[in-house]
Amino acid sequence: MILVLKIAAILLLSFVIVFACFKMVMKRLLSNHRFFATISKSFYNYFYSLKDLHHLRTNNFGYAPIDEDIAHYDPDLQYGIQLYKELVKNHHGYLIPEKSAVVEVGCGKGAGAEFLLKKFNPGTYTGIDFSEKAINFCNKTYKQIPNANFICADAHRLPVDHNSVDVVINVESSHLYKDQDKFFSGVHNILKAKGKFLFTDYRRVKNCSIDTLEKQISDCGFSITEKRIITPQVKNACMLASERRNRLVEMAAPRYLKKYFRHYAVLNGTKKSAMLANGEIIYFIYHLEKK
Ligand SMILES: C[S@@+](CC[C@H](N)C(=O)[O-])C[C@H]1O[C@@H](n2cnc3c(N)ncnc32)[C@H](O)[C@@H]1O
């Protein structure tokens, strides 16, 4: 009996040690820029190639309530499109002038792009994403739109001319970038003088407070012209969309990834949903101007 207990204790201890080492190695690897980029790019390439999610052309938490002019969109896209609409307006109106040069970094499958192109008719729109699947999808789906083009590239190295852009858009993508300063400086570099950077995303307050974020923004040469904390509206969208998103997860995610997908989709009852509710995650909109 004692021998059995000893063997069980040794096995348990070995398991704990192996698990702790595995966690440590993963943490080290994930803090390595290249490894992290490879993992997140593979995830998005996989996510965007799921057949059951073909119609899902927005990929953000969303914003609620939705406006009347958004209500005709597929219900799985409405909250995501509304977030784009919220981002590009202030109390005086919309911030994308007709015929302007617009670049979006992290465009995903491009429903936001299509919305912006139809509503504002910019002179040029360039969507950038590091997922080949997303860019191939966009190039096929929106090929009829003459002033749009889509490029596969990394947010840390924007393949756009210096001083050539009027408005840069960035929706729920920057939290994935390892080097925020490099991204902000890259955006600053491609914008014309007084160009606008319309920026929405979330941060885990534990990892990056709003003060830290605003210091990074200012150090990279931007002034803040508008700031809105939209956590309640984003939380509301997640809550209202939870049932539909749960159906998509059940349909599309393999069994071993279901838990991860539920968390990713911010379904009711997940840790991420609780973090939005209790303030551990803050969702913001910033309108920035190149100084
Ligand atoms: C949460 S999705 C948002 C997509 C889109 N903005 C939307 O709201 O539907 C994040 C997007 O950022 C892209 N992304 C993440 N890291 C990137 C990087 N370093 N460079 C370019 N794109 C990146 C992903 O491929 C993904 O399409």
Image: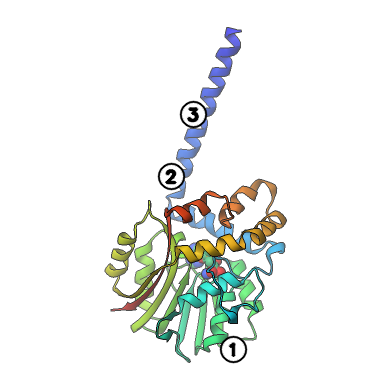
Above or below: residue 198 compared with residue 145: above
Secondary structure state at the residue bearing disc 1: loop
Q: Which residue is mark 1?
A: 146
Q: Residues within 10 Å of mark 2 (few under 14, many from 20)?
A: few
Residue 159 seen by the camera = no
Percent x, y of residue 171:
48, 70
Viewer-nearest residue: 8 or 281: 281
Could you tell me which residue is drawn at 57 percent across and 66 percent down?
A: 59
- What colouring style does the render use? rainbow
- Quick check: can you spot residue 147? yes
Q: At numbered mark 2, what does the secondary structure look like: helix, strand or loop?
A: helix
Which is nearer the N-term, disc 2 or disc 1? 2
The structure residue drawn at horizontal position 42% and vertical position 50%, both measured from the top left corner, is 31
Q: In the displayed structure, does residue 275 sit left or right of residue 188?
A: right
Q: Position of residue 151 (x, y in %)?
A: 54, 75
User: Measured from the top left, where is residue 127 in percent x and y?
Assistant: 52, 76
12 above or below 154? above
Q: Which residue corresponds to mark 3? A: 17
Residue at mark 3 to residue at mark 2: CA–CA distance: 17 Å
User: What amino acid is found at the position of numbered circle 2 in the picture?
Assistant: Arg
Residue furthest bottom in the image: 99
Q: Nearer the viewer, residue 100 or 135?
A: 100
Which is more toward the observer, 286 or 269?
269
Callout 1: few (<14), some (14-19), or many (20+) C-alpha neighbours within 10 Å? few
- Residue identified by numbered label 2: 28
Mark 3 or mark 2, earlier in chain: 3
Q: CA distance from mark 1 to mark 3?
A: 58 Å
Marks 2 and 1, Cα distance to the nearest angstrom? 45 Å
> Does ligand 1 reach within 8 Å of label 2's beta carbon?
no
